[in-house]
Image: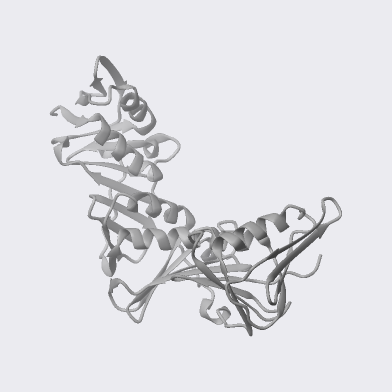
Amino acid sequence: MTKLTIPRERLLDALSLVSGAVGRDGVASAVLVGDGRITASNLETRISVDVADLGEGAVLLPHRRLTEIARSAPKEAEVEITPKDNSCRITAGRGSWTIPTEAPSAFPAAAAAEEKAFATLSAGTLRDMLVRVQAATDPESSRYALGGVLLEIDDDSLHAVATDGRRLLWATTGDVEAAESSSMIVPAAGVAVLIQVLAPAASVRITRTAAEVVATTDAGVTASIRLLEGRFPKWRDVVVKPAAEATILQSSLVAAVRQAAIVTSEQSKSVLFTLGEDLTLAAQSAEAGEARVRCDLESAGAAAKVRLDPRFVLDAVKAAGPDEVVSLQARDSETACVLRWDNVVAVVMPMEGD
Protein backbone atom coordinates (compact mmCIF):
# COMPACT_ATOMS: atom_id res chain seq x y z
CA MET A 1 0.00 0.00 0.00
CA THR A 2 1.38 3.40 -0.95
CA LYS A 3 2.38 6.20 1.37
CA LEU A 4 -0.31 8.86 1.89
CA THR A 5 0.74 12.50 2.19
CA ILE A 6 -1.37 15.47 3.24
CA PRO A 7 -0.54 19.02 4.43
CA ARG A 8 -1.01 19.37 8.17
CA GLU A 9 -3.55 22.23 7.90
CA ARG A 10 -5.64 20.36 5.31
CA LEU A 11 -5.64 17.28 7.52
CA LEU A 12 -6.78 19.24 10.57
CA ASP A 13 -9.57 20.91 8.59
CA ALA A 14 -10.81 17.54 7.32
CA LEU A 15 -10.64 15.91 10.76
CA SER A 16 -12.63 18.82 12.21
CA LEU A 17 -15.31 18.56 9.51
CA VAL A 18 -15.83 14.81 10.04
CA SER A 19 -15.80 15.04 13.85
CA GLY A 20 -19.62 15.15 14.01
CA ALA A 21 -19.74 11.56 12.77
CA VAL A 22 -17.05 10.14 15.07
CA GLY A 23 -18.26 7.69 17.71
CA ARG A 24 -16.89 7.02 21.17
CA ASP A 25 -15.23 3.64 20.76
CA GLY A 26 -14.34 0.82 18.39
CA VAL A 27 -14.43 1.32 14.64
CA ALA A 28 -16.85 4.24 15.10
CA SER A 29 -14.06 6.23 16.79
CA ALA A 30 -11.78 5.80 13.76
CA VAL A 31 -11.61 7.55 10.40
CA LEU A 32 -10.95 5.99 7.03
CA VAL A 33 -8.05 7.88 5.44
CA GLY A 34 -7.18 7.40 1.78
CA ASP A 35 -8.62 6.91 -1.70
CA GLY A 36 -8.91 10.67 -2.00
CA ARG A 37 -11.01 11.34 1.10
CA ILE A 38 -11.32 11.17 4.86
CA THR A 39 -14.51 9.56 6.19
CA ALA A 40 -16.11 9.06 9.60
CA SER A 41 -19.26 7.08 10.46
CA ASN A 42 -21.11 6.35 13.70
CA LEU A 43 -23.90 4.52 11.80
CA GLU A 44 -26.33 7.41 12.36
CA THR A 45 -24.19 9.97 10.51
CA ARG A 46 -21.53 9.60 7.83
CA ILE A 47 -19.28 12.47 6.71
CA SER A 48 -16.71 12.36 3.90
CA VAL A 49 -14.28 15.14 2.95
CA ASP A 50 -12.54 15.08 -0.42
CA VAL A 51 -8.76 15.46 -0.22
CA ALA A 52 -7.54 15.31 -3.80
CA ASP A 53 -3.81 15.10 -2.99
CA LEU A 54 -4.17 12.28 -0.46
CA GLY A 55 -3.10 9.46 -2.78
CA GLU A 56 -4.28 5.90 -3.34
CA GLY A 57 -4.86 3.22 -0.74
CA ALA A 58 -6.68 3.53 2.59
CA VAL A 59 -6.00 3.03 6.29
CA LEU A 60 -8.24 3.06 9.36
CA LEU A 61 -6.87 5.41 12.06
CA PRO A 62 -8.14 6.62 15.46
CA HIS A 63 -9.59 10.10 15.00
CA ARG A 64 -8.51 11.50 18.36
CA ARG A 65 -4.92 10.30 18.13
CA LEU A 66 -4.50 11.41 14.51
CA THR A 67 -5.87 14.83 15.44
CA GLU A 68 -3.39 15.12 18.33
CA ILE A 69 -0.51 14.16 16.04
CA ALA A 70 -1.50 16.75 13.45
CA ARG A 71 -1.90 19.46 16.09
CA SER A 72 1.57 18.74 17.45
CA ALA A 73 3.22 19.14 14.04
CA PRO A 74 4.66 22.42 12.70
CA LYS A 75 2.13 24.53 10.82
CA GLU A 76 3.75 24.09 7.39
CA ALA A 77 4.52 20.39 7.84
CA GLU A 78 3.25 17.57 5.67
CA VAL A 79 1.89 14.51 7.41
CA GLU A 80 3.05 11.23 5.87
CA ILE A 81 1.04 8.06 6.58
CA THR A 82 2.63 4.73 5.70
CA PRO A 83 0.34 1.72 6.29
CA LYS A 84 1.89 -1.65 7.12
CA ASP A 85 0.31 -4.99 8.00
CA ASN A 86 -1.43 -4.25 11.31
CA SER A 87 0.11 -0.87 12.05
CA CYS A 88 0.80 2.49 10.51
CA ARG A 89 3.81 4.80 10.64
CA ILE A 90 3.02 8.52 10.74
CA THR A 91 5.65 11.24 10.37
CA ALA A 92 5.12 14.98 10.76
CA GLY A 93 7.96 17.46 11.11
CA ARG A 94 10.57 15.83 13.32
CA GLY A 95 8.10 13.47 15.00
CA SER A 96 7.19 9.91 14.08
CA TRP A 97 4.62 7.53 15.52
CA THR A 98 3.76 3.89 14.93
CA ILE A 99 0.23 2.98 15.95
CA PRO A 100 -1.83 -0.22 15.62
CA THR A 101 -4.63 -0.23 13.04
CA GLU A 102 -7.56 -2.34 11.95
CA ALA A 103 -8.27 -3.47 8.40
CA PRO A 104 -10.09 -0.83 6.28
CA SER A 105 -12.71 -3.49 5.52
CA ALA A 106 -13.87 -3.20 9.16
CA PHE A 107 -15.17 0.31 8.46
CA PRO A 108 -18.94 0.40 7.80
CA ALA A 109 -19.76 0.71 4.12
CA ALA A 110 -22.11 3.40 2.87
CA ALA A 111 -25.67 2.20 2.46
CA ALA A 112 -26.73 1.76 -1.14
CA ALA A 113 -30.06 3.49 -1.75
CA GLU A 114 -31.76 5.51 -4.45
CA GLU A 115 -31.41 9.26 -3.91
CA LYS A 116 -34.09 11.74 -4.90
CA ALA A 117 -33.47 15.46 -5.44
CA PHE A 118 -34.78 17.74 -2.69
CA ALA A 119 -33.22 21.21 -3.02
CA THR A 120 -30.13 23.15 -4.09
CA LEU A 121 -29.36 26.48 -2.46
CA SER A 122 -26.77 28.71 -0.86
CA ALA A 123 -24.99 26.90 1.96
CA GLY A 124 -24.96 30.10 4.01
CA THR A 125 -28.73 30.51 3.63
CA LEU A 126 -29.46 26.97 4.79
CA ARG A 127 -26.98 27.25 7.65
CA ASP A 128 -28.55 30.52 8.86
CA MET A 129 -32.02 28.94 8.74
CA LEU A 130 -30.90 25.95 10.82
CA VAL A 131 -29.10 28.18 13.34
CA ARG A 132 -32.24 30.28 13.75
CA VAL A 133 -34.58 27.38 14.51
CA GLN A 134 -32.48 24.71 16.24
CA ALA A 135 -33.13 26.07 19.76
CA ALA A 136 -36.76 24.89 19.58
CA THR A 137 -35.94 21.19 19.08
CA ASP A 138 -36.64 18.79 21.96
CA PRO A 139 -34.49 15.63 21.67
CA GLU A 140 -35.83 14.37 25.03
CA SER A 141 -39.47 14.37 23.92
CA SER A 142 -41.32 11.06 23.67
CA ARG A 143 -42.73 12.47 20.42
CA TYR A 144 -39.69 11.73 18.28
CA ALA A 145 -40.65 14.23 15.58
CA LEU A 146 -40.10 17.10 18.06
CA GLY A 147 -36.46 16.06 18.38
CA GLY A 148 -35.49 17.52 15.03
CA VAL A 149 -36.00 20.21 12.40
CA LEU A 150 -38.61 19.80 9.69
CA LEU A 151 -37.32 20.65 6.21
CA GLU A 152 -40.25 21.14 3.87
CA ILE A 153 -40.49 22.12 0.21
CA ASP A 154 -43.74 23.88 -0.63
CA ASP A 155 -44.55 26.24 -3.52
CA ASP A 156 -40.86 26.50 -4.53
CA SER A 157 -39.87 27.64 -1.04
CA LEU A 158 -37.84 25.83 1.60
CA HIS A 159 -39.07 25.95 5.21
CA ALA A 160 -37.12 24.96 8.32
CA VAL A 161 -39.34 24.49 11.39
CA ALA A 162 -38.73 23.32 14.94
CA THR A 163 -41.05 23.14 17.95
CA ASP A 164 -41.03 21.65 21.43
CA GLY A 165 -44.74 22.32 22.00
CA ARG A 166 -44.11 25.51 23.98
CA ARG A 167 -42.52 27.58 21.21
CA LEU A 168 -42.05 27.28 17.48
CA LEU A 169 -39.33 28.72 15.25
CA TRP A 170 -39.78 28.93 11.49
CA ALA A 171 -37.37 30.21 8.82
CA THR A 172 -38.05 30.24 5.10
CA THR A 173 -36.38 31.09 1.80
CA GLY A 174 -37.60 31.29 -1.77
CA ASP A 175 -34.05 31.51 -3.13
CA VAL A 176 -33.84 27.79 -3.77
CA GLU A 177 -33.87 25.36 -6.68
CA ALA A 178 -36.49 22.98 -5.34
CA ALA A 179 -37.79 19.61 -6.43
CA GLU A 180 -41.40 18.56 -5.97
CA SER A 181 -43.14 19.18 -2.64
CA SER A 182 -41.61 16.99 0.04
CA SER A 183 -40.64 17.03 3.71
CA MET A 184 -38.33 15.28 6.16
CA ILE A 185 -37.25 15.61 9.80
CA VAL A 186 -33.53 15.96 10.52
CA PRO A 187 -32.58 15.05 14.13
CA ALA A 188 -31.06 17.76 16.33
CA ALA A 189 -27.65 16.06 16.28
CA GLY A 190 -27.82 15.96 12.49
CA VAL A 191 -28.74 19.65 12.36
CA ALA A 192 -25.58 20.42 14.35
CA VAL A 193 -23.58 18.39 11.80
CA LEU A 194 -25.10 20.30 8.88
CA ILE A 195 -24.35 23.64 10.53
CA GLN A 196 -20.71 22.58 10.88
CA VAL A 197 -20.15 21.19 7.38
CA LEU A 198 -21.98 24.05 5.65
CA ALA A 199 -19.70 26.71 7.17
CA PRO A 200 -16.89 26.56 4.56
CA ALA A 201 -19.19 26.00 1.56
CA ALA A 202 -20.85 28.33 -0.94
CA SER A 203 -23.61 26.01 -2.15
CA VAL A 204 -25.19 22.73 -1.11
CA ARG A 205 -27.24 20.10 -2.89
CA ILE A 206 -29.72 18.22 -0.72
CA THR A 207 -30.98 14.79 -1.74
CA ARG A 208 -32.78 12.14 0.24
CA THR A 209 -33.31 8.41 0.40
CA ALA A 210 -36.05 6.55 2.22
CA ALA A 211 -34.06 6.76 5.46
CA GLU A 212 -31.42 9.49 5.08
CA VAL A 213 -30.78 13.06 4.01
CA VAL A 214 -27.60 13.62 2.02
CA ALA A 215 -25.97 17.06 1.85
CA THR A 216 -23.21 17.56 -0.73
CA THR A 217 -21.34 20.87 -0.72
CA ASP A 218 -19.14 22.51 -3.31
CA ALA A 219 -16.35 22.38 -0.71
CA GLY A 220 -16.06 18.63 -1.20
CA VAL A 221 -18.01 17.52 1.88
CA THR A 222 -20.78 14.92 1.87
CA ALA A 223 -22.87 14.30 5.00
CA SER A 224 -25.44 11.49 5.22
CA ILE A 225 -27.77 11.67 8.23
CA ARG A 226 -30.42 9.20 9.31
CA LEU A 227 -33.82 10.90 9.40
CA LEU A 228 -36.33 10.87 12.26
CA GLU A 229 -39.57 8.99 11.88
CA GLY A 230 -42.89 10.32 13.10
CA ARG A 231 -45.44 12.97 12.19
CA PHE A 232 -44.52 16.61 12.65
CA PRO A 233 -47.26 18.84 14.16
CA LYS A 234 -49.43 20.95 11.85
CA TRP A 235 -47.18 23.91 12.44
CA ARG A 236 -48.98 26.40 10.21
CA ASP A 237 -52.06 26.18 12.44
CA VAL A 238 -50.29 27.99 15.31
CA VAL A 239 -48.89 30.84 13.21
CA VAL A 240 -51.75 33.33 13.49
CA LYS A 241 -51.73 37.11 13.54
CA PRO A 242 -52.98 38.43 16.89
CA ALA A 243 -54.80 41.77 17.26
CA ALA A 244 -52.05 43.99 18.70
CA GLU A 245 -48.84 44.62 16.78
CA ALA A 246 -45.82 46.74 17.68
CA THR A 247 -42.29 46.94 16.33
CA ILE A 248 -39.11 47.22 18.36
CA LEU A 249 -35.36 47.13 17.78
CA GLN A 250 -33.85 43.73 18.54
CA SER A 251 -31.24 45.32 20.82
CA SER A 252 -33.91 47.14 22.85
CA LEU A 253 -36.02 44.00 23.21
CA VAL A 254 -33.07 41.82 24.25
CA ALA A 255 -31.85 44.36 26.83
CA ALA A 256 -35.31 44.77 28.37
CA VAL A 257 -36.00 41.02 28.55
CA ARG A 258 -32.65 40.34 30.16
CA GLN A 259 -33.24 43.07 32.76
CA ALA A 260 -36.69 41.77 33.66
CA ALA A 261 -35.48 38.16 33.80
CA ILE A 262 -32.98 38.98 36.56
CA VAL A 263 -35.64 38.42 39.24
CA THR A 264 -37.18 35.27 37.74
CA SER A 265 -36.61 31.93 39.42
CA GLU A 266 -37.26 28.23 38.88
CA GLN A 267 -40.65 28.64 40.56
CA SER A 268 -41.49 31.99 38.90
CA LYS A 269 -40.16 31.88 35.34
CA SER A 270 -42.46 34.24 33.47
CA VAL A 271 -42.31 37.89 32.47
CA LEU A 272 -45.47 39.91 31.82
CA PHE A 273 -45.28 41.78 28.48
CA THR A 274 -47.61 44.80 28.25
CA LEU A 275 -47.96 46.48 24.87
CA GLY A 276 -49.23 50.04 24.69
CA GLU A 277 -47.57 53.31 23.82
CA ASP A 278 -44.38 51.58 24.94
CA LEU A 279 -43.40 48.08 26.05
CA THR A 280 -43.43 47.35 29.77
CA LEU A 281 -41.97 44.15 31.19
CA ALA A 282 -42.74 43.06 34.75
CA ALA A 283 -41.50 40.07 36.72
CA GLN A 284 -41.37 38.99 40.34
CA SER A 285 -40.42 36.06 42.52
CA ALA A 286 -40.41 35.44 46.26
CA GLU A 287 -36.70 34.65 46.14
CA ALA A 288 -35.39 37.58 44.05
CA GLY A 289 -37.91 40.42 44.30
CA GLU A 290 -39.54 42.48 41.56
CA ALA A 291 -38.54 44.12 38.28
CA ARG A 292 -40.29 46.61 36.02
CA VAL A 293 -38.63 47.66 32.75
CA ARG A 294 -39.94 50.07 30.13
CA CYS A 295 -38.57 50.53 26.62
CA ASP A 296 -39.51 52.53 23.54
CA LEU A 297 -41.22 50.99 20.55
CA GLU A 298 -40.47 51.81 16.91
CA SER A 299 -44.23 51.74 16.33
CA ALA A 300 -47.18 50.96 18.61
CA GLY A 301 -50.61 49.44 18.06
CA ALA A 302 -53.47 48.22 20.21
CA ALA A 303 -52.92 47.39 23.86
CA ALA A 304 -52.32 43.76 24.89
CA LYS A 305 -50.84 41.73 27.73
CA VAL A 306 -49.24 38.31 27.63
CA ARG A 307 -47.02 36.37 30.04
CA LEU A 308 -44.03 34.65 28.40
CA ASP A 309 -40.93 32.67 29.27
CA PRO A 310 -38.07 35.16 28.73
CA ARG A 311 -35.68 32.40 27.63
CA PHE A 312 -37.90 31.56 24.69
CA VAL A 313 -38.10 35.19 23.58
CA LEU A 314 -34.31 35.54 23.76
CA ASP A 315 -33.80 32.25 21.88
CA ALA A 316 -36.16 33.46 19.19
CA VAL A 317 -34.44 36.79 18.43
CA LYS A 318 -30.80 36.00 19.26
CA ALA A 319 -29.96 35.40 15.58
CA ALA A 320 -31.34 38.78 14.55
CA GLY A 321 -28.96 41.72 14.26
CA PRO A 322 -29.13 44.42 16.94
CA ASP A 323 -30.43 46.98 14.42
CA GLU A 324 -33.11 44.71 12.98
CA VAL A 325 -36.72 45.66 13.68
CA VAL A 326 -38.77 42.89 15.26
CA SER A 327 -42.55 42.76 14.94
CA LEU A 328 -44.13 41.82 18.27
CA GLN A 329 -47.73 40.57 17.94
CA ALA A 330 -50.00 39.67 20.85
CA ARG A 331 -53.70 39.43 21.70
CA ASP A 332 -54.36 38.32 25.28
CA SER A 333 -53.12 36.08 28.09
CA GLU A 334 -54.41 32.93 26.38
CA THR A 335 -53.10 33.48 22.85
CA ALA A 336 -49.60 32.75 21.57
CA CYS A 337 -47.27 35.69 20.96
CA VAL A 338 -45.75 35.95 17.48
CA LEU A 339 -42.41 37.60 16.71
CA ARG A 340 -41.34 38.27 13.11
CA TRP A 341 -38.28 39.66 11.40
CA ASP A 342 -36.50 39.08 8.12
CA ASN A 343 -37.42 35.52 7.03
CA VAL A 344 -38.11 34.24 10.56
CA VAL A 345 -41.32 33.68 12.52
CA ALA A 346 -41.29 32.73 16.21
CA VAL A 347 -44.37 31.60 18.13
CA VAL A 348 -44.16 31.58 21.93
CA MET A 349 -47.01 30.04 23.92
CA PRO A 350 -48.35 32.07 26.87
CA MET A 351 -47.72 31.09 30.48
CA GLU A 352 -50.11 31.22 33.39
CA GLY A 353 -49.48 33.74 36.15
CA ASP A 354 -47.03 32.53 38.78
Q: What's the residue at 39%, 41% (across, down)?
A: 22
Against 272, residue 31 (above or below) is above
Q: Nearer the viewer, residue 62 or 193?
A: 193
Q: Nearer the viewer, residue 204 or 246?
A: 246
Q: What's the residue at 38%, 54% (across, down)?
A: 194
Q: Nearer the viewer, residue 63 or 209?
A: 63
Point out the image quarter for the N terminus. top left
Looking at the rendered structure, the number of numbered marks drawn on it comes to 0
Residue 54 placement: quadrant: top left
Q: Nearer the viewer, residue 247 or 201?
A: 247
Where is residue 17 drawn, in percent x and y?
Answer: 33, 43
Where is residue 75 drawn, in percent x and y?
Answer: 27, 26
Whether residue 227 appears in this view of the structure is no
Q: Is residue 305 left or right of residue 12?
A: right
Where is residue 200 drawn, in percent x and y?
Answer: 30, 49
Q: Is residue 81 left or right of residue 152?
A: left
Whether residue 128 appears in this view of the structure is yes
Residue 42 placement: quadrant: top left
Where is residue 89 drawn, in percent x and y?
Answer: 24, 20
